[in-house]
Amino acid sequence: MSKETGTIHHYNQLKGFGFIRREKGKDVFFFFADMLNDATDVIIGETVEFEIKKETKGPRAYKINVLG
């Protein structure tokens, strides 16, 4: 599974999910629980690296790592 990079462009803190705008391809859904490195918050505009799995409702980001 290859890693991709993108930017967090939407996040709903109450529901714990959001969307990452990929450099190539459509936006991808993520859950806060898939954030790595003991993340305590999600900031719109952060650049992240992640893996994608195809789910029944579309692609989903896993193993999300915030890049410096």
Image (cartoon, grey):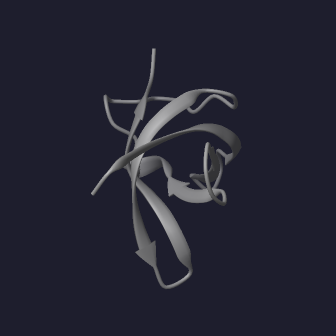
Horizontal relation, residue 9 to residue 40: left or right: right
Residue at horizontal 27%, vertical 57%? 1
Q: Residue furthest front?
A: 24
> Residue 9 at what x, y percent from top left?
72, 41
> Residue 63 at what x, y percent from top left?
33, 47
Residue at horizontal 66%, vertical 60%? 26
- In the figure, residue 57 lies in which quadrant? bottom right
User: In front here: 63 or 52?
Assistant: 52
Q: Residue furthest bottom?
A: 56
- In the figure, residue 13 lies in which quadrant? top right
Q: Up-down: is 35 above or below 43?
A: below
Q: Residue furthest left?
A: 1
Horizontal relation, residue 27 to residue 34: left or right: right
Q: Up-down: is 58 above or below 63?
A: below
User: In front here: 2 or 47?
Assistant: 2
Specify the quadrant that holds the C terminus: top left
